[in-house]
Image (cartoon, rainbow, N blue to C red):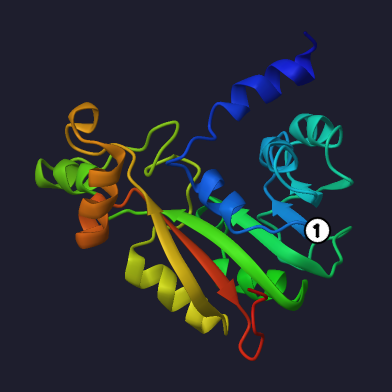
Amino acid sequence: MGEGALRYAADAAAIGRDSVYAIALGWLKDGDAVLDVGCNTGYVGRAAREKLRVVFDGIEGDAAAAAVAREAYRSVACVDLSSAPPWAGVSGPYDAVLALDVLEHLPDPGRALSALAGLLAPGGRLIVSVPNVAHWTVRLGLLVGRFDYVETGILDRTHLRFFTRESILEVCAGAGLVVEETAFTTNAFPLRKLVSHGMRRKAAAFLPGPLAYQFVLRLSPPGFRPVP
């Protein structure tokens, strides 16, 4: 197995039924042209093609990951996502733009959202996800005086911004976007192994502030009517 296949096999493990990727794939439709922002090795597009006839383009800052993604995507622009959009080599229009766990890495998320919305075709949608800094694990750490950066997760050391449900909604509204649907993941749920997936989702729906691990939003520009 080559290096590209090894990278894909490792990344593909991130796609499960309680993941932002699974939620986003559920919001795509047959025939969509999709832009995957921060596409990594292209594992989201590969998973989508197993169920849908879709065309994926990507944007990725890591050259090695972009090279692997090009094996599955129509095109991948290798650009620094922290630079101000619009980004070179990216046009459109697209039926869907994915920015999954990307906004927290950007210095100006609102500007990025506005630029990405401009790449949508009429009736298109922008699908974004952000980690929830109000999650119970972070609250517990603050209770004992800890706010420690780590390699991955909500307090990933590469995060430049932190979001709650209310603050990401404010950023979206400031970018002139309409929230069509919201969802969430329930990673790091208390007693996860003892609580069914269905019960975790019901509990997080009732208390999204402390129990939602990531928020996922389907957005559209005002005046655009998403295709059912």
**In which image quadrant can residue 15 be found?**
top right
Q: Residue at x 18, y 37 (%)?
A: 190
Q: Position of residue 226 (x, y in %)?
A: 64, 77
Q: Quadrant of the N terminus?
A: top right
Q: Residue furthest bottom?
A: 223
Crowding at mark 1 (Cα within 10 Å: few <14, some 14-19, many 20+): few
Which sits in the foreground, 208 or 116? 208
For residue 145, side relative to residue 15 (left or right): left
Q: Residue 218 at what x, y percent from top left?
A: 54, 67
Up-down relation of residue 108 to residue 130 (above or below)? below
> Where does the C terminus fall, quadrant-wise?
bottom right
Q: In the shown orientation, is residue 110 left or right of residue 6?
A: left
Residue lying farthest to the left in this orientation? 144
Q: Which secondary structure, mark 1?
A: loop
Q: Kindly identify which residue carries mark 1.
A: 31
Instruction: Say what amino acid the circle numbered 1 marks.
Output: Gly
The mark total stands at 1
Residue placed at 15% from the left, 43% from the top? Answer: 140
Q: In terms of depth relative to the viewer, which is nearer, 153 or 149?
A: 153
Q: Residue at x 61, y 88 (%)?
A: 222
